[in-house]
Image (cartoon, rainbow, N blue to C red):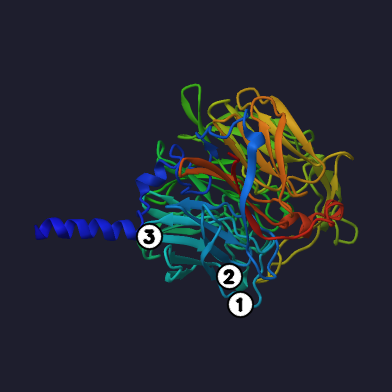
């Protein structure tokens, strides 16, 4: 009798504490509907929900049920993707804040505001893209390059770990990844001459398990012991340039349980002036596939060798099935869409997904290398008459990319990727540069310009087999928010003008929209609770466009900042 009573008490205590988030639950996140446990609605990053309660036939009944303000004066750059578990929503906000909210009513349960020091140097606004859930913890990163783990019931700090020195330009803005029971993170700060890397920690304690730099010449570590140098020192980086090589892993990664690999995009090499670092500059502007258990790079594919346009390469690698094989799709900032074998990295297909790419005429599918246009590389300033400014060129896309941080979605139902794209170019030129700790490490100047008068942004439905754009919805301002697609044949995305929109996934016909009051630069999510399907998106204009956008920024300077969460369901 006593044993039975004890068992009942244990069960009651567990129920009161809420179900712990396990690796098995996270692995099944893409197919379960009562929660959102990972950035990407599944670690594969497809952002597809099997929910169909809300569909093309009834979406006209979709209405807001609650809106919550983040409050205060910190109303800018809201790029967070919420997580939902046990009826609680966990959503990060600008300036390294996180909130726990009743997912049904919008009532704030607790909030944590990280105390930021003076002198932080985030490249592209004070944003945060989301958190990770594991066990009884909610874990997120901060602008001063720390990781903070909180008790998800109370918001109490359980552990805090420093990633790196914010005074050297390091920061952290991505949502952490949970894979094989490990907390896997990257680093931000590519414009400051940092060294990109991927790290794995014990999510319960924050203790480091392995470190894998993604610039050749740097040592990796496993359980505190040397685990081999990345690549071969000076093979593709001349002199000491590898020591400040950039390649920041600032968008975070995806993970596929079928391959056992984590996929991280790596950012631009430092500095932007490519004549300083002649060579391919591995593993910058690439996709790297890392064995989660060992921290070793199993394969890599470089999208832009010797990047001279800040085309980066950090965009998400989304795994999916095609022709009976596991593939990965990536819409790179350089304007080309790539399909790689997810197990080996072999290039299967590559094609432009924007209307103009000047830096290369195409991608050689046999070698995997771009066919560069040598006349479109910004000139070497040391070859100029005054040694101060190299030959300027007009390049497309602009350095903000054919697609930037805003995550795309893939529907297994239609076989299409839904990609938020932008049509712009830039005048760019190189300048002399010397590394200085904590200072911007560019060596380039630029002016961004729209390519067309009537639109910059376009949501495009892209066939990864053929490269065909099946449909598109143009937008006057740049698109800077992510995408969600569902089994209800719907695609959801937001615009800087403030709208959350939905289109028929097969035809592109807009079937619903709602004005949120500020620009949407975040990805929507969906889940089911109490028998009803909900849609949520964070609203708050900001990010890189108003800071770096040149003539484009002037086009959208009337847009209002904000900071709120909107949640919708069907009106009965």
Q: Tell me whether the residue at label 1 lies in contact with that at label 2, contact meaning CB atoms closer than 8 angstroms.
A: yes
Kindly give the residue lying farthest to the left in the view shown. 1
Kindly give the residue lying farthest to the bottom in the view shown. 118
Compare residues 544 and 559 and report the one nearer the observer: 559
Q: Is residue 33 left or right of residue 391?
A: left
> What is the crowding at mark 2: few (fewer than 14 residues within 10 Å), some, or many (at least 20)?
many
Q: Give the Cα distance between marks 1 and 2.
A: 7 Å
Residue 201 percent coordinates (x, y): 40, 60
Q: Give the Cα distance between marks 3 and 2.
A: 24 Å
Compare residues 525 and 403 and report the one nearer the observer: 525
Q: In this rendering, is residue 147 above or below 273?
A: below
Q: Residue at x 36, y 48 (%)?
A: 23
Which SS class for mark 3? loop
Residue 478 percent coordinates (x, y): 77, 46
Q: Is residue 455 left or right of residue 49?
A: right
Q: Nearer the viewer, mark 3 or mark 2?
A: 3
- In the picture, the quarter occupied by the N terminus is bottom left
Query: Residue 493 is drawn in which quadrant?
Result: top right
Pointer 1 or 2: first along the chain: 1
Residue 204 percent coordinates (x, y): 36, 62
Q: Residue at x 45, y 34 (%)?
A: 343
Kindly give the residue lying farthest to the front in the view shown. 572
Compare residues 398 and 297 and report the one nearer the observer: 398
Which residue does the numbered mark 3 point to in the structure image? 136
Query: Residue 12 is drawn in which quadrant?
Result: bottom left
Residue 446 percent coordinates (x, y): 82, 54
> What is the crowding at mark 1: few (fewer than 14 residues within 10 Å), some, or many (at least 20)?
few
Which residue does the numbered mark 1 point to in the structure image? 117
Q: Is residue 295 left or right of residue 356?
A: left
> Which labelled disc corresponds to residue 144?
2
Pointer 3 or 1: first along the chain: 1
- In the picture, the quarter occupied by the C terminus is top right
């Amino acid at each position: 009798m006593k044993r039975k009573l004890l068992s009942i008490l244990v069960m009651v205590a567990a129920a009161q504490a809420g179900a712990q988030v396990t690796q098995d639950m996270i692995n099944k996140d893409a197919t379960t509907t009562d929660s959102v446990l990972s950035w990407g609605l599944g670690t594969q990053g497809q952002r597809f929900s099997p929910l169909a309660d809300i569909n093309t036939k009834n979406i006209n009944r979709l209405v807001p049920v609650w809106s919550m303000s983040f409050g205060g004066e910190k109303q800018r750059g809201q790029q967070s993707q919420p997580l939902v578990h046990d009826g609680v929503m966990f959503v990060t906000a600008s300036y390294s804040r996180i909130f726990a909210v009743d997912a049904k009513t919008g009532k704030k349960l607790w909030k944590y505001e990280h105390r930021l020091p003076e002198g932080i140097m985030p490249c592209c606004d004070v944003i945060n893209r989301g958190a990770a859930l594991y066990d009884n913890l909610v874990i997120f990163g901060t602008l001063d390059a720390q990781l903070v783990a909180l008790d998800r019931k109370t918001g109490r700090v359980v552990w805090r770990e420093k990633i790196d020195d914010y005074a050297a330009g390091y920061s952290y803005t991505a949502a952490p990844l949970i894979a094989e029971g490990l907390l896997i993170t990257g680093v931000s700060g590519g414009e400051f001459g940092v060294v990109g890397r991927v790290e794995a920690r014990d999510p319960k304690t924050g203790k480091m398990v392995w470190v894998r730099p993604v610039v050749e010449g740097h040592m990796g570590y496993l359980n505190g012991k040397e685990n081999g140098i990345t690549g071969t020192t000076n093979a593709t980086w001349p002199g000491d340039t590898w020591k400040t090589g950039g390649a920041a892993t600032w968008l975070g990664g995806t993970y596929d349980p079928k391959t056992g690999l984590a996929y991280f995009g790596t950012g631009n090499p430092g500095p932007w002036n490519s004549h300083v670092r002649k060579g391919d500059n591995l593993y910058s502007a690439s996709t790297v596939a890392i064995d989660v258990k060992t921290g070793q790079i199993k394969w890599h594919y470089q999208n832009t060798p010797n990047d001279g346009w800040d085309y980066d390469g950090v965009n998400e690698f989304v795994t999916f099935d095609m022709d009976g094989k596991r593939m990965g799709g990536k819409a790179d900032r350089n304007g080309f869409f790539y399909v790689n074998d997810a197990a080996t990295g072999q290039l299967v297909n590559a094609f432009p997904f924007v209307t103009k790419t000047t830096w290369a005429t195409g991608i050689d599918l046999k070698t995997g290398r771009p066919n560069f246009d040598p006349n479109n590389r910004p000139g070497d300033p040391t070859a100029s008459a005054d040694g101060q400014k190299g030959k300027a060129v007009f390049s497309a896309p602009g350095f903000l990319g054919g697609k930037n941080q805003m995550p795309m979605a893939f529907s297994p139902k239609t076989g299409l990727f839904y990609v938020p794209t932008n049509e712009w170019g830039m005048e760019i030129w190189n300048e002399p540069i010397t590394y200085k700790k904590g200072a911007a490490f560019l060596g380039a100047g630029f002016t961004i310009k729209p390519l067309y008068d009537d639109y910059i942004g376009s949501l495009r439905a892209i066939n990864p087999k053929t490269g065909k754009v099946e449909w598109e919805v143009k937008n006057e301002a740049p698109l800077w928010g992510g995408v969600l697609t569902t089994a209800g044949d719907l695609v959801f995305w937001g615009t800087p003008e403030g709208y959350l929109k939905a289109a028929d996934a097969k035809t592109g016909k807009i079937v619903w929209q709602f004005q949120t009051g500020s620009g949407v630069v975040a990805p929507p999510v969906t889940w089911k609770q109490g028998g009803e399907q909900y849609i949520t998106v964070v609203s708050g204009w900001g990010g890189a466009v108003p800071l770096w956008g040149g003539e484009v920024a002037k086009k959208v300077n009337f847009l209002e900042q904000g900071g709120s969460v909107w949640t919708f369901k069907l009106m009965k």
